């Protein structure tokens, strides 16, 4: 027996039908349950750096994103992950001890210490990207190029809207 959602279809001018919105909400829940298990991250850690934790991947991603706009400090990592700076400092220390990150003097201000990825950290992020790419390719294998392009554009737009909505509430 299949699960069907029976509601009265009401058009809402800005957002589509109530059924469409409910479908999106249900899909979000299913996606959250799948990604909550963090299978991709676990596979990447197992392959490249056994002994690391999923929290370490979050820190690596914060470092990667932070490096795009400049140098990364422990404070920036804490802010990005919304954790206490002392906790961020402990996690960074663990990652330095495991040779995933290293500390160095800032190029802009030698009194300041910044965090950078080691080659092992870079390999771990590369493996994570490969795992994600393989999963996405498997999911869309029977989609047309047009469907992939449309979904990519709309999914990016949706996630950007999601981020903006919650950023405006902070």
Image (cartoon, rainbow, N blue to C red):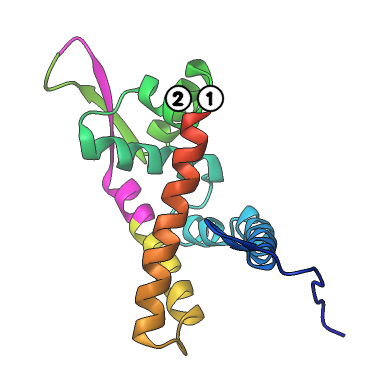
Name the residue carrying label 1.
Answer: 83
Q: Quadrant of residue 112?
A: top left
As helix, strand or loop, the secondary structure at mark 2 comes to helix
Asked if residue 115 lies in the magenta stretch, the reply is yes
* Residue at position x 69%, y 67% in the image: 19
Q: Can the viewer see residue 53 in this picture?
A: no
> Which comes before the other along the chain, label 1 or label 2?
2
* Relative image position of residue 5 (x, y in whole percent): 79, 72
Which of 112/104 is in front? 112
Residue at 38%, 19% in the rendered image: 75
Q: Residue at x 47, y 59 (%)?
A: 44
Q: Position of residue 68 (x, y in %)?
A: 23, 40
Q: Which residue is mark 2?
A: 78
Q: Residue 45: which disc?
A: none
**In this view of the protein, can residue 121 be seen by the observer?**
yes
Q: Against 97, is 157 above or below?
A: below
Residue drawn at x 38%, y 32% as measured from the top left: 96
Most extreme residue toward the right is 1
Query: Are the two marked residues, 1 and 2, in contact with CB atoms closer than 8 angstroms?
Result: yes
Queried whether the magenta region covers residue 143, the answer comes back as no
In the displayed structure, would residue 111 be above or below residue 65?
above
What are the residue bounds of the magenta stretch?
110-125
Q: Is residue 74 above or below residue 52?
A: above
Query: For the view shown, which residue lies furthest in the top direction?
Result: 111
Give the image location of residue 143, x and y in percent. Answer: 45, 86
């Amino acid at each position: 027996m299949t699960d069907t959602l029976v509601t009265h279809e009401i058009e809402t001018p800005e957002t589509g039908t109530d059924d469409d919105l409910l479908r999106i909400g249900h899909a979000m829940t299913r996606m959250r349950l799948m990604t909550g298990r963090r299978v991709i991250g676990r596979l990447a850690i197992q392959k490249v750096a056994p002994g690391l934790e999923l929290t370490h991947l979050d820190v690596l991603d914060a470092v990667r994103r932070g490096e795009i706009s400049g140098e990364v400090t422990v404070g920036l990592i804490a802010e990005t992950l919304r954790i206490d700076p002392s906790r961020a400092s402990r996690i960074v220390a663990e990652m330095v001890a495991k040779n995933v990150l290293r500390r160095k003097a800032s190029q802009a201000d030698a009194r300041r210490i910044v965090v950078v990825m080691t080659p092992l950290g870079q390999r771990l992020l590369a493996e994570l990207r490969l795992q994600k790419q393989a999963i996405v390719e498997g999911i869309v294998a029977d989609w047309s190029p047009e469907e992939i392009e449309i979904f990519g554009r709309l999914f990016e737009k949706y996630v950007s809207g999601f981020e903006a909505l919650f950023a405006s509430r902070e």
